[in-house]
Image (tube, grey):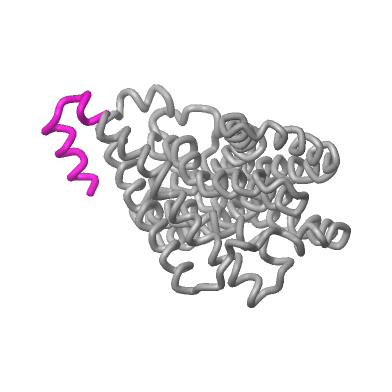
Amino acid sequence: MDTWIIQLYHSTNEIAFLAISAITAVIFCFWFIPNATDIMVNSAAGLADKYLGRKQRTIVINSSTNNPELFLMLLSLSIGRLGGIATPLGSNFANIYLMFIVAPIIVISKWIFTGKISYIKKFIEILNKEKLLFLWHLLMSLSMFAFATTAYWCITGESEFTPLPEGMSSRTLPWVIVGGLICLAGVLVFFFYEAKFKRKRPELFDDINADDYEASWLKFILGTVLLILLCYILNTLFMAWTEIYDDLLSRLFGDAVFAGLHYFLGSLISSLPETIVAVKNYDRLTSPDLNTAMASASQSNMTNLGIGFLGSFLASLLLAMGMNYQL
């Protein structure tokens, strides 16, 4: 598919190609991904309630939204690009500003546009009432981000906000292993503190709104497959853009354009399902749904670390077998 995209670029002028790319991005962001997310998440929550118990719905809802990060990473590893691990690690940064800043702005803008001004007052009242809940999720999100940042440095040897220099190659096997272990440590830390949190506030996990949830394996598989397909298309677009705009992107992301695209653009797009879940739950104006909305950052960040650990583990095995990876 990337060859077809490059052929399209050469057969059209620059403006037409950019217009097609922009339209594709809009359709993905505002139609395909939201609908696939709704199908998958609602089914995942229903299945969690049926098979795992009500307390597990929140984590299943937010963990299932990490499927794009998982498959973007696996697709990248399958073509020998270690930079794909940057997608779940970069999503930890994207989740913080998307869930705590962008999603509330979207919800408040929606209320203003529809004339529901009183909802803004109720939202402020709930936030004021649940200040400790907000601080818990923010602290856990930042902690998971710190683990992700450290793991990223272990894998690349650079800060995630520093353009990767010319001639950059992936780190040696021991560094990749250490990066994976740091991801695993972050997951264990999260589960330790979340278990204490659940014992203290069990109602936040028992009483979430379940009107839209349906325990359907068929819809869960359908939604998941749709997201896999979207991830495949996004991944091929990344590869094509890496070749087409190599000079421009190198100025922004350094020589390792693929890793840079995955860290900043890939992670932003793959965090859209979490943003959709956050907006939907902020809009419900209850403490349990507020917890679910903010968990789109904290729990998803933990899941991203789990995905990063899986990617590092797989890459370590392949490196040990003599396979070479590029960033």
Query: Residue 33: horizontal and vertical position, in percent?
Result: 43, 49
Q: How many marks?
A: 0
Which residue of the protein is positioned furthest toward the left in this rendering?
A: 11
Which residue of the protein is positioned furthest toward the right in this rendering?
A: 200
Q: Is residue 247 left or right of residue 207?
A: left
Viewer-proximal residue, 255 or 63? 63
- Highlighted range, magenta: 1-18
Which residue of the protein is positioned furthest toward the bottom in this rendering?
A: 51
The vertical placement of 326 against 111, above or below, is: below
Query: Residue 98: horizontal and vertical position, in percent?
Result: 59, 37
Viewer-proximal residue, 26 or 96? 26
| Residue at 72% across, 46% down | 285
Q: Main secondary structure of the magenta part?
A: helix
Viewport quadrant of the C terminus: top left
Query: Residue 305: horizontal and vertical position, in percent?
Result: 61, 52
The vertical placement of 40 against 119, above or below, is: below
Query: Residue 235: horizontal and vertical position, in percent?
Result: 35, 47
Viewer-proximal residue, 313 or 92? 92
Query: Residue 129: in sight, yes or no?
Result: yes
Q: Quadrant of residue 127?
A: top right
Q: Quadrant of residue 205?
A: bottom right
| Residue at 14% across, 32% down | 10
Q: Is residue 199 magenta?
A: no
Viewer-proximal residue, 148 or 154? 148
Query: Residue 327: in sight, yes or no?
Result: no
| Residue at 67% across, 37% down | 100
